[in-house]
Structures are given as C-alpha cells and as structure tokens.
Image: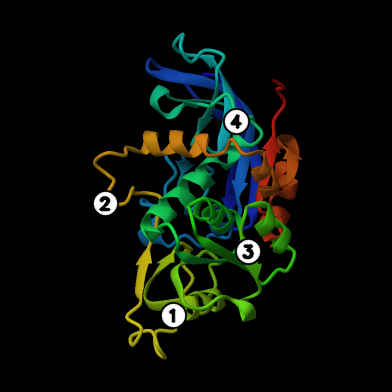
Amino acid sequence: MPTSEALWITSPGNCELDATGFETPAGFVEVETLFSGISRGAEALVFRGEVPETEWQRMRCPLQEGVFAFPVKYGYATVGVVEEGPHELLDRTVFVLHPHQARFSAPESMAVPLPKEVPAARAVLAASMETALNIVWDARAAPGDRIAIVGAGVIGALAGYLCARIPGTEVTLVDKNPMRAALASTLGCRFALPQDSPEDCDVVIHASASTAGLATALAAAAMEARVVEASWYGANHVSAPLGAAFHSRRLQLVSSQVGHVPADRRVRWPNRRRLKTALGLLADAGLDILISGESEFSRLPARYAAILADPATLCHRVRYGRTQ
C-alpha cells in the first residue's frame, strides 16, 4: 500500500506529519496535492478538542480519518492534480474535500475539476465559498435589502461579497478589527465597527462566533427581520440576548450549516452542484485578498498552532512540493 505524509492532530494542541497509507480502488482517483487551505474557525475547535461528543458524527469531514477524541486527520479544502483515474479526469486540477495530505485517493465523484478561470492557488477558498453560498440562501437576501454581516472572517466576508452582488443591496461588513475596512472595500461592501453598526437591516448574518457579535447582530435587525446564525461554537456556550426588543420586533433567528442544502433547494441542488457553483464564483481575482498567508507543508506542524491562534488569519494556504 502506498503512503503519504498527512497532518494528524494527536491530542489537544498537538499535531505532527505522519505517513498515512491509502489505496486507489476502482471508482477512485489518486491526487497529488498542490495546495490546501486552513479553515481557522473549525480547525481551531478541532485542534483544541472542543468538538462536543454529541457532534462527532455530524461534524466528520467527508474523507476524515480518526475520531475527534484523537488522533484525527481533519480538513476540507484541498486542490491537486489527478495522477491516476479515468481519462476525463487524468491530469486535471481538481478540488476535493480532503484533509491536509501530500497525496491521497478519493471517490471520482468528489474530485471536482476547476473552471479554467480559477487558479489552483485561489481554489482553496471553495469550501468557504460553498458555506457562504448556503448562508446567503438561508438568509433569503433579496434585491434592495439592507444587509449587515457581523464578523469579517473568511465566511462572513464571502457572504458579504455574494450579498453585495445582488442588485440594489446595501451591504455592511461589521468587525472589531478596523484593518478589515480595506477588505470590505475590495469585496464591494461598506465597513463599520460594532459601535457604528447599521440599524434597521432587512437581513443580518452573524459570523463572529462571539457573544458580543451575536448581540450586535440582533441589535442591527429591523422589525421582523431575519438573523442568520452562521457561527459554530463547538462545545462552547454562548449567551444570546433575547430580552430587550427581540420579541417586540418579532425577529427570526435561524441557523445555517453547510452540511445540508436548504430544504427549499435540496431536491434540485445535490452537494456536487453546489460545490461546482462555488468554484465558479471564485473567478474574481479580488478574492485573493482572503489569502492571509502561506506555509510549506513540511513546516505546517511547527506553525499550525500559531496560525489558528492568530485573529488576523483569514484563509492560510498550505503549499506542497509539486509545481504546476
């Protein structure tokens, strides 16, 4: 059985590269990795051991190995070249929901070719764009809406990017870091600090994973507005300020989670169609601003903890040995 180096989280706060065996049976492709992307929010919770046991099965990545009790191989944003597989995929650059690993196999159906307009180095954003697309569907944002997104990390920023392209919308990214103003401008959004957050919004998306951010999101919502909770807190508890005007304004607080396409689309939108759409939405070179750093795969164990702990991290890209 061939082996390849993969990043394994061995215990809370510890990780290492280890040789991992894989096979490429019929119906699978073998992929040599070019890049993978670190999703700071989810991967930090896994790294710290903060995935509640009740969610161990639901929060498994499609090609995850191990369990959240450790050791676990986790991640879901990998771009590589098909080295073995059917003729139509051979030598194609594909996106796969796979953990950080230099070479691996995956079902053919999970290897989605990149559109020619999307470079491999940017395609690591595909899983985040897929999540943002799902959030916008759950938000039911419409032309002319006044929209606030609280939390300008990768997911919030991409949700803002999509909302800003709906005709007539007024979209504001809200974040406590004033340095995110330039990011908002590049993505076609306004920017505000929490104390200057807009009011009377038709749609509010919360993506800061904090109690303070949720309070800001609820305060920004207009009468009978829809507030989408896009954060995931893992095993952490959060206080929701459901007093004050929450009931008198008849606010809707709804969850969004990428594991399921919204019910009103599910029959027409299998996950592969959604992922292909997300890849196509990455054709804009302006989205490169969401790549906040890059590391060599061989150095990842030494840098992983610091990357996850740094609040300035957006999408951190991991570069592997092969060049295109």
CA gap between label 1 and label 4 equals 39 Å
Q: Amino acid at mark 3?
A: Arg
User: Dot 4: few (<14), some (14–19), or many (≥20) neighbours within 10 Å?
Assistant: some
CA gap between label 1 and label 2 equals 26 Å
Residue 267 showing in the rendered view: yes
158 vs 196, nearest the viewer: 196
The location of residue 14, given as percent across then percent down, is 64, 53
Numbered badge on residue 13: none
CA gap between label 4 and label 3 equals 26 Å
Could you say whether the residue bearing mark 1 is in a helix, strand or loop? Answer: loop
Q: Quadrant of residue 63?
A: top left
Name above or below for residue 180 compared with residue 4. below
Name above or below for residue 230 compared with residue 32. below
**Front tag of 1 and 2:** 2
The location of residue 109, given as percent across then percent down, is 39, 26
**Front tag of 2 and 3:** 3
Sequence-wise, the earlier of marks 1 and 4 is 4
Sequence-wise, the earlier of marks 1 and 2 is 1
Q: Which residue is mark 4?
A: 118
User: Dot 3: few (<14), some (14–19), or many (≥20) neighbours within 10 Å?
Assistant: some
Sequence-wise, the earlier of marks 2 and 3 is 3
Could you say whether the residue bearing mark 2 is in a helix, strand or loop? Answer: loop
The location of residue 190, given as percent across then percent down, is 63, 64
Q: Amino acid at mark 2?
A: Ala
Q: Which residue is mark 2?
A: 263
Could you say whether the residue bearing mark 3 is in a helix, strand or loop? Answer: strand
Q: Which residue is mark 1?
A: 240
Q: Which residue is mark 3?
A: 190
